[in-house]
């Protein structure tokens, strides 16, 4: 059985479009509470690239802030 977290990490269930592999890595790190700077260092990419992915993730999930994807995952929104 596929868990809700797995579906969320792939941009399924609630995203407007599937997440790219890079966006999935960034999303999982966001859900773990890491900052954009920490994520960039962790996955060896520039902070600007990480920020671009974060903005894309927010757009795909129709949210505006960092706590909203977590709330979606927990089933608090929609």
Image (cartoon, rainbow, N blue to C red):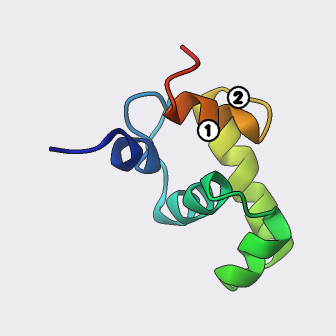
Q: Please, is residue 36 above or below residue 45 in the view?
A: above
Asked which secondary structure carries label 1, the reply is helix
Badge 1: residue crowd in 10 Å (few <14, some 14–19, many ≥20): many
Look at 43% across and 43% down and name the residue there.
Answer: 18
Find disc 1 in the rendering and name its residue: 70
Quarter of the image that includes the C terminus: top right
- The reply to whether the C-beta atoms of the residues labelled 2 and 1 are less than 8 Å apart is no
Task: Determine which quarter of the picture holds residue 58.
Answer: top right
Mark nearer the viewer, 2 or 1: 1
Task: Determine which quarter of the picture holds residue 4.
Answer: top left
Q: Earlier in the sequence, mark 2 or mark 1?
A: 2
- Residue nearer the viewer, 35 or 16: 35
Look at 35% across and 42% down and name the residue there.
Answer: 7
Q: Which mark is residue 44?
A: none
Q: Please, is residue 66 above or below residue 51 in the view?
A: above
Look at 46% across and 64% down and name the residue there.
Answer: 21
Find disc 2 in the rendering and name its residue: 63
Quarter of the image that includes the N terminus: top left
Asked which secondary structure carries label 2, the reply is loop
Badge 2: residue crowd in 10 Å (few <14, some 14–19, many ≥20): some
Question: Percent x, y for residue 76?
Answer: 57, 20
Look at 58% across and 18% down and name the residue there.
Answer: 77
Q: Please, is residue 40 above or below residue 70 in the view?
A: below
Question: Percent x, y for residue 9?
Answer: 45, 50
Question: Percent x, y for residue 43?
Answer: 64, 80
């Amino acid at each position: 059985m596929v868990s809700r977290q797995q579906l969320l990490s792939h941009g399924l269930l609630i995203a407007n479009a599937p997440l790219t592999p890079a966006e999935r890595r960034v999303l999982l790190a966001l859900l773990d509470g890491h900052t954009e700077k920490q994520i960039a260092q962790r996955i060896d990419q520039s902070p600007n690239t990480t920020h671009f992915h974060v903005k894309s993730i927010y757009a795909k999930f129709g949210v505006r802030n960092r706590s909203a994807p977590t709330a979606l995952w927990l089933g608090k929104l929609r």
